[in-house]
Amino acid sequence: ATPLSITIATGKAATLGILVRSAQALETAADVDTVVLDKTGTITQGTPQLVGFDVFGAWHGREGELLALAADAERNSEHPLAAAIVRAADEGSAVAGIDAVGAGSDDGADDAAEFTAIPGRGIVATVRGHVVIVGNAELVDDHDVGMPDAAGESVDDVFASIDRHAALGHTPMLMAVDGLLAAVIAVADTVKPDSKQAIAALRARGIDVVMLTGDNQDTARAIAHDVGVDHVIAEVRPDAKADEIARLQADGHVVAMVGDGINDAPALVRANVGFAIGGGTDVAIESADITLMNGSLAGVVTAIDLAHATMRNIG
Ligand code: ADP
Ligand code: MG
């Protein structure tokens, strides 16, 4: 392609809210045969809501107190899952019968005294003298959490709760307090209105579409099913997303990655073409070749079509 044709295509893309950083990016976009999509904030809106709070042991009847503890533990986290828990405690949630009791105030007086975020796993915090863990099963396993023996519940009840939420596409998290399992916290994210259509359009062009996420396998599959993606790579640690891109490239694929998070940055750099969701994190935008200003996956289809048209015209 000539510099002029690429300049014209880049200008056209810009008018459509697709910011192309280099001529090379547009040229490579014409060769893409695999599009890898981050889930949270890319396929979905990225602002999950609390939809379930299943408590165990002595916490029956004290849901509000427990939610306040979870929120105060998560207050220092920047993760969207943490934000969902904090919002539910501060502004109320759709979960029946749960009103957070005594959650922290804006002055930070009730913030966690100690706080550690473990990327791709969750958080450990000390709140009002209690050690609170919120995260995935791996995190809970690492901390030797036991099952409370009150109320005749067993781990089977915990797994049943997790499975029920995951099958609905909700993200289940485990909460433990002072070494005992306390709750399954479930949040649900909404798929962006045009994700499904954009994915269908990519597949109609013969492009393989892959979902790449740190979330629970069953949750990821449920959402993938809703949007028409059949290739799911889930429970991927943040630092391993780029390795998954490299693996696809080693199989001979030309890979585009689309993401919004800090976690996605190395994968965006590694991909042949990196697309950032506008409104995503600065790190993702700086790591990408192309930014989709309106955040819609339709922009990926448009960019690839423009790339093909440009490369064809020049011949
Ligand atoms: P994603 O790819 O969806 O952004 P991450 O890799 O950030 O997911 O996190 C993977 C999993 O780790 C989450 O689904 C959740 O179970 C757990 N997790 C991560 N951060 C937190 C947090 N702040 N609070 C609770 N759980 C968390
Ligand atoms: Mg994301």
Image: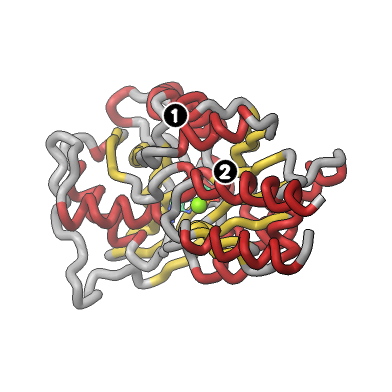
Image location (x, y in percent) of residue 228: 53, 26
Does 97 sit above or below residue 243? above
Residue drawn at point x = 25 percent, y = 48 percent: 66
Q: Nearer the viewer, residue 96 or 305?
A: 305
In 3D space, how far apart are the residues under numbered discs 2 and 1 (Cα atoms)? 29 Å
User: Circle 2 is placed at which residue position?
Assistant: 301
Please state if 12 lies on the left or on the right of 23 as rendered: left
Image location (x, y in percent) of residue 98: 16, 41
Residue 13 occupies quadrant: bottom right
Does 126 sit above or below residue 300? below
Residue 159 occupies quadrant: top left
Image location (x, y in percent) of residue 92: 15, 49
Classify 10 Å Cα crowding around label 1: few (below 14), some (14-19), many (20 and above).
many
User: Circle 1 is placed at which residue position?
Assistant: 166
- The reply to whether the C-beta atoms of the residues labelled 2 and 1 are less than 8 Å apart is no
Q: Amino acid at mark 2?
A: Val
Q: Nearer the viewer, residue 174 or 61?
A: 174
Residue drawn at point x = 25 percent, y = 38 percent: 58
